[in-house]
Structures are given as structure tokens and as C-alpha cells.
Image: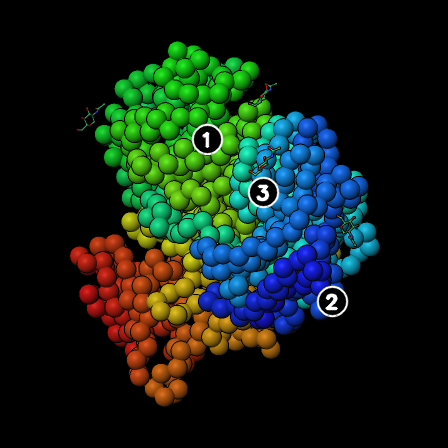
Amino acid sequence: MAVILLFLLPSLAVLDAVPVAFQHTLQGDPYSSKKTSENSFDFTMDDQANFTFTQEGKSWLQSAPAFLYTEGKRFSAEDGSLKLDHRETESGADKMGTWTSQCFVYMAGSRSWKLCAKAWQDPAWPAVVFQQHFINGTDGSAHDTDSVISGFPSFQIQSEDNGFGFLGYQGCMFGDTNSKIGSWTQKGQGLTGGILGGPVAIFDQNHGVCIMAPFSEFMSTSRAVDGNGRVSWGVMGGVISVPTGFVQQSIVYCGNTGINQVFSDWGRFMRTYYNKDDTYRKTDLTVNYLGFYTDNGAYYYHTTEPNKNYEDTILEIKEYIDSMAIPYRYVQYDDWFYPRGPKRGTVTWEPTPAVSPHGFQYIYNITKLPVAAQNMYWSSKTTYAKANGGKYDFIVETDKAIPQDLTFWMDLLKGARLWGLVMYEQDFLDQEFYTMNATQSTVDVAKTWLMQMGQAARATGLTIQYCMSNPRHAMQSLEIPVVTQARVSGDYHPGNDQWLIGESSIFAHAMGIAPWKDNFWTTTDQPGNPYNLSEPYPELEAVVSTLSTGPVGPSDRVGHTNVSLLMQCCRADGLILKPTKPATAIDKQIWQEAWKNGVGPSGQVWTAYSHVGYDWYFGIVLAVDIGADFKLFPSDAGFTSFEALTVITRSNQKTTTPQLSDFGEANPIQLTSGCTRLNFCMYYTSPVINVDRAATQIVIYGEEMKFVPMSPGRVSNIDVTNDDVIVTLQGTTGETITFTNFVNGKLVRHTCKFGQTGIASLGLKDPRSTCQMV
Ligand SMILES: *[C@@H]1O[C@H](CO)[C@@H](O)[C@H](O)[C@H]1NC(C)=O
Ligand SMILES: *[C@@H]1O[C@H](CO)[C@@H](O)[C@H](O)[C@H]1NC(C)=O
Ligand SMILES: *[C@@H]1O[C@H](CO)[C@@H](O)[C@H](O)[C@H]1NC(C)=O
Ligand SMILES: *[C@@H]1O[C@H](CO)[C@@H](O)[C@H](O)[C@H]1NC(C)=O
Ligand SMILES: *[C@@H]1O[C@H](CO)[C@@H](O)[C@H](O)[C@H]1NC(C)=O
Ligand SMILES: *[C@@H]1O[C@H](CO)[C@@H](O)[C@H](O)[C@H]1NC(C)=O
């Protein structure tokens, strides 16, 4: 797909006009929606910093005038109070290649404020970054925390309905709780400004998408939405003074490959710029192995076994899981273990004697289970703060406190390593930020807090889970390598709707964060539970957790785990058999929510895929709560670039034999109202592999007894020879699995028992072939 961005500069003599043009074909990621349009996007900026984004002459985004608050006044290009001093063209090179900027230096009173639009030459990046350089800083800027003190870029939403839809992430849980999807018109967009806001994508029904988002200084960048239909990006509205030399940046990233693909590409751009790779996520025990959870919604949330303390309850859990051979590899402790202050904030992050008379190290020494532990915001009474007689620098306000001290985090986390901590869960990120003054009135306090936490976690060998993150925290994780995972929906309570993570997972996937669904029960009834509730859909909960690519963390009472159900997530050693790409809602589901015009399915249609071996892709479709019949084509699923496909229908009534059928633009999957929460529908796509000079067709299903039958965690390679397909399998010593495939349409099941090495190879053509230990 050709993407061209142009700076079209008028023939003004004062301008050193350097037109920048770049062009690129997107490649590499197979998750590619059907491209019905090859139209490119053009960015055009005039000599007054007015700009538009257009596609084939159609306006997508149009600028509104820039503005800045300083000295208690609002300076705007609109009324001439912001005066253009001169223009500059700049160029250079950074991690993303060579770039060119068109800059406009304004005077706001005596303060110089430079605005630039920057674009890279590399055609891989259909992006424009908008910069605000605070050459002389600002003072007396704060005016409204939910607005911004500076606006550039600022967009004028057109008042007529031009057929655009939008998806805005806002609220907590990675911008899930208040996210909005709708028609992009001035009225009723439902976008909130300020503190809760985050990235906004606008899109049409021709697969075009433009994403607007912060590009740097994530903790102090906001968007404002005003009554005139203007959306502006800049420094958040509570900031009193911006330091001299501060630079704030936002990005517009466009493409015509659909919502999922453009988010994924934008995410790749951001992660590349910030060096956020998947090293820590790939090696994080808590992302990759089954864990036991005790947070809100769990049986043991502020609840123990009768007449036992938490210490003895955890020891009992350990005995139970050992007796059932459930391979939990870590245990999560929640906010029940530490003393809290008047407004619930943490006073000292250590277990009270009532919870654990012998201390957590005692438990760890017995169970040998590594620990993930939650923490909330800090109480103003925290014993760690110098203000309260402690050793460390905190900013202490009326109810809460926030650390500004790397040594504090080093000491805290090093100490917790001794009781088995491997993952630190920072919860209530939103409240620590938006109920404090220092975080919102400065550009650096909140960033320092998260960066120091991340630096200490990295130095002590821990990873971090974000919980209740607003989009600002979510994006700040780009600069913190050890933040591997984050909650992407509200708290689990048996039977509730928080499994609906298909849309928030698009944003998490872009940020390189493993989406975490939260705990769940594997059986419907858990006697004596603190909620007096039951879970009607344990299997759906287990499937969604497994497809999320995040942690899988049940929270049952001792004696109440459905082991055969749960173990469909994992290998015998607890390694989660996950797909490569998390399950995300298809574009058409979002279109349908935006326009409600029958253009997409009513209900949840999510797709994921596994990338196995050198270049094999196995697709997964999950359909739940389907209202009207819907035909799902490979292009809707994002599977267009996969090889010739077949589809295998899974039923959660285990008695049925897998059915193989063609899947193509002529053979869609028919989704019907039969796909419910209890009987949700799952389909697996598989390439047709030709051997014996195309006389034999082999289609791999994989492990029927797993939610993800083909996972890179089990199948490490697929070798196609002239007359066979040989898979390399990985398992736990002594583990027995059944591996299924089709040979010329006929079902073949092989049994494989892993020996000492845990590696086996299996030829798929001959029904009598057996696993060879490697
Ligand atoms: C261009 O920008 C100037 C200064 O910001 C503004 O006054 C003018 O209305 C803008 N023109 C258009 C066409 O938006
Ligand atoms: C603004 O910054 C410029 C460049 O550093 C400097 O020359 C100028 O004196 C500053 N102006 C004010 C009012 O501080
Ligand atoms: C836990 O085991 C370590 C290593 O053996 C030992 O040093 C420590 O004292 C033990 N802690 C408790 C509380 O038993
Ligand atoms: C809020 O924080 C700013 C910056 O730290 C400080 O100047 C201001 O006095 C604080 N306001 C209140 C009400 O505490
Ligand atoms: C628990 O729920 C059941 C059914 O909704 C209800 O009949 C019962 O009174 C509830 N028990 C308590 C202790 O709330
Ligand atoms: C365990 O889950 C399976 C579905 O995987 C179900 O058929 C079975 O009834 C469940 N058993 C219990 C005890 O809930």
C-alpha cells in the first residue's frame, strides 16, 4: 500500500520550502485486513500552520488554530495574540531514519513557543509528529485540569456527518472503562477530555484509519475536547509552569488497512522508537505460566478458609493443587495483606502478623511458589516517607503520597524478592495520579514515579503489571521495558461482563503489553464465597484468558477447580498454550458499534493467530453473543494473507468430531445466534499443505484438547518434505498428548508421550507413525 505524506508549502519567499514525500508498502505482519483501497493519505500544511490530512481529496482531519496559556492569559493564532515570528525548516536523523520538520516560531508575549510538524523519509512510517517546543517555558498556565494549557495539533471536527466513525480509548484499565465508539460528528462523540483521555482513531468503511495519540511525555500530555467541536493535544491543563526547553509531542498515524492493522503498525512504530521489545514479556513467568489469584472476584479475596489465617490458607491451597497436580507456578497476593491508612492507601507494604504470623518468607520457603503481589496508592501516613519518620523522599498530600526516590523502590523491591516476589502489580494507577495535586500540576512528578518504579524493578529482576491504568500510564510503559502486562477490563465478579476485552486488547497489543483479563472461577458454584454469586460460563472465562496472551489466573476455592477444563489452557508444566497475537475484535464489530447499520456482526467476533515455525499461521475465531446471522470472510478475520485455508469447527460439547471445510472469500464461516456465552463458537483455520507432488493434502489441527490447538508453546517447527509433514513438539517429561491432523480429508490422531528431553518429532501422513524422541 502506498502511503504518501506531503508537506505542500506555498511559494512564499520567507519559507525555505523542502517538500517531503515518502512512500511505502506495508509488509511483515500477516494480520492484514482486506485492502479495498490503495488510496494514500496526504498531509498538507500552509504558511500559517494550518494543515489537513486528506485521502484522494477527501478531508479526514482539519486543523483548528494553536493556542497557549501563560501568564494567566490565553494566546491564540486565531485572534492574533499568538504572533508568528519566523519559520524554520529542520532536518536530521534519529532511530526512525532521516526526518524533516516544518517549524513555526510564535511569540506568546515575551515567550517563544515553537511548533513543528515532523515526518520521516522512511516510507515505513506514514506518520506526522507534532511538536511543541517550550523555548522559554511557561508560567501561570494552569486553568482546568481536564483541558490542556497548550493546543497543537488542534483539530476541528466537521459539523456534518462525513461518514467517519471513531474509537476513543479513555478511562482506566488501559482506557477500557470509558472507551467510546461512535459516529465522528461534532455532537455526541462522547469523548471526554483531559485526565482520562487517550488515543482516538477515526475510520471509514473503506478500511481507512487515522490515529491521534500522544507521542512523548505521556504522563503530562492530554487531549481537550471543547464545546466548539475541537479536539486539541498538548500539556495537561493543571500544569502551572512548563520548564524551559520542555518538548511535548503528539502523533497522527494513518493507513488504509483497517483498524486492527493500523493500530498494530502504529504500535510497532511507537515500540521501535522507544526500544520496547518483547524480551521481558517472553521470559515473564507470570505471563507465560498458570498462576493462582486472590484479587477482587477471587474466592480468597479478603476471605480465608474458616478458622484459618491467610498463611494457613495459602499452605492449604498449595497442598490441594499438589494433590490434584494443577501446575500453578506462582501465587498472587492482593490488598488484604498490608496495613492501610484512612483512605485505604498503603501504609507499609508488608504482611500484617494477623495475615501471616511467620512472614511471607516462611510461606515461600514451604511452598516454593514465586509471588506476584499487588500494591495500591500510598497513604499520606506511609511509614516510608521522611515526613512520617521514614527514610525516603515522598510528596505527601492530604490523603495520598507519591514516592520520588529511586532508593525507596530499590529497597522495597529487593526486600520483597526475599519472600519470592517475581512480579510487582501496581494497582490504582489512576487514583494515585488524579487524586493528587503534584502529579497533575507538574510535567515530571508522575513520570518520575513510574520511571523509578520501573528502573528498580528491572534492577531487582522483577516485572510489573499495571492495573487501573489510564491511557497515559499505558503509553508511559513504552519507556519501561519491564512492564509486561496490564489489566484491560474491570474487576472480575462471577458472572459479570469483564471478559469483554476484544477491543481494549487492540490498544494493549499495539503497546506490546500482554492483556490481562483478571481472575475467574473454573466451576460454577464455590460454596461459602464472599459474593454469594455463581459463575455460569467458566469455559468462556478460561478460553478468553487463554486467547488473551496475558496471564491465566483462576481463583477457585480449595476443592473446586475443574481440572480437565482448566488444563485445556496449558501444558502439563503450566506453560500457557497461547496464540501469538491476542484475540481482538474484528474491524467490522467496531464498525457495527459505530454505525449500527448492519455492516458488521452484532455480538463479539474476535480473531487471533499462532505463528508457528518459519512461516506458518493458524487462525482462531471466537464468536459469542451473536445476534443476527453474519458471514465471516477471511478478510474480515484479518487472515487474507494466510495460505489457502481450511477451517475446523470446535464445539464445546466435546462429543463431536472435528469438521473440516473450505474457508475462503467464496466460503465464509456462517455465524449464527447459536453462538452464545454457554455455547460459544470457535473455529480454527489451517493452511492446506501439499506433499507427494500435490497427491496428498495435509491439514494440521493440533491438540483437540487445548483451546489453542496450534501454539508455538507446543509446536516449535513444521518441516515439509517431499512426502510428509513433520512437526517438532515440546512437552513435559511424561506428558501424553493427542495430536490431530487430516490426510486427504481423513481424520488422523497420533498419541505422543514425552521423554526426558521433552522434545519429539512426528510425521503426520502415516496414521501409524509415532513420536520420535529428540
Ligand atoms: C489559518 O491559520 C490562521 C492562524 O492560525 C487562522 O487565522 C486562519 O483562520 C486559518 N485558516 C484556515 C483556512 O483555517
Ligand atoms: C527565550 O529563550 C531564548 C533562547 O534561549 C533566549 O534568547 C531569550 O532571552 C528567552 N526569552 C525570555 C523572555 O526568557
Ligand atoms: C527461608 O529459607 C532461607 C534459605 O534457606 C533461610 O535463610 C531463611 O531463614 C528462611 N526463612 C524463614 C522465615 O524460614
Ligand atoms: C499543587 O502543586 C503545585 C506544584 O507542586 C504547588 O505549587 C501548589 O501549591 C499545589 N497546590 C496545592 C493546593 O497544594
Ligand atoms: C444468596 O443468594 C441467594 C439467591 O440469589 C439468596 O436466596 C440468598 O438469600 C443469598 N444469601 C445471602 C447470604 O445473601
Ligand atoms: C468441567 O468442565 C467440562 C467442560 O470442559 C464440563 O463438561 C464438566 O461438566 C465440568 N465439570 C465440573 C465438575 O464442573
Q: Which residue is mark 1?
A: 449
Q: Earlier in the sequence, mark 1 or mark 2?
A: 2
Q: Mark 2, residues whose alpha carbon is within 10 Å: few (<14), some, or many (≥20)?
A: few
Q: Cβ(mark 2) to ligand 1 < 8 Å? A: no
Q: Nearer the viewer, mark 1 or mark 2?
A: 2
Q: Nearer the viewer, mark 3 or mark 2?
A: 3
Asked if disc 1 and disc 2 are in contact, CB closer than 8 Å, the reply is no
Instruction: Return the x and y of residue 486 as percentages of the image width and height.
Output: 47, 42
CA gap, disc 3 and disc 2 = 31 Å
Q: Earlier in the sequence, mark 1 or mark 3?
A: 3
Q: Which residue is mark 3?
A: 133
Relative placement, left or right, of 64 versus 699 is: right
Q: Amino acid at mark 2?
A: Gly
Q: Which residue is mark 2?
A: 57
Residue appearing at x 70%, y 52% in the figure: 49
Q: Quadrant of ligand 3?
A: top left
Q: Nearer the viewer, residue 282 or 21?
A: 21
Check the image and tell me how it is coloured. Answer: rainbow
Q: Amino acid at mark 1?
A: Trp
Instruction: Return the x and y of residue 682 as percentages of the image width and height.
Output: 51, 60
Looking at the figure, which quarter contains the N terminus? bottom right
CA gap, disc 1 and disc 2 = 45 Å
Disc 2 element:
loop
Q: Nearer the viewer, residue 497 or 263?
A: 263
Residue appearing at x 74%, y 61% in the figure: 59
Residue, far top: 389
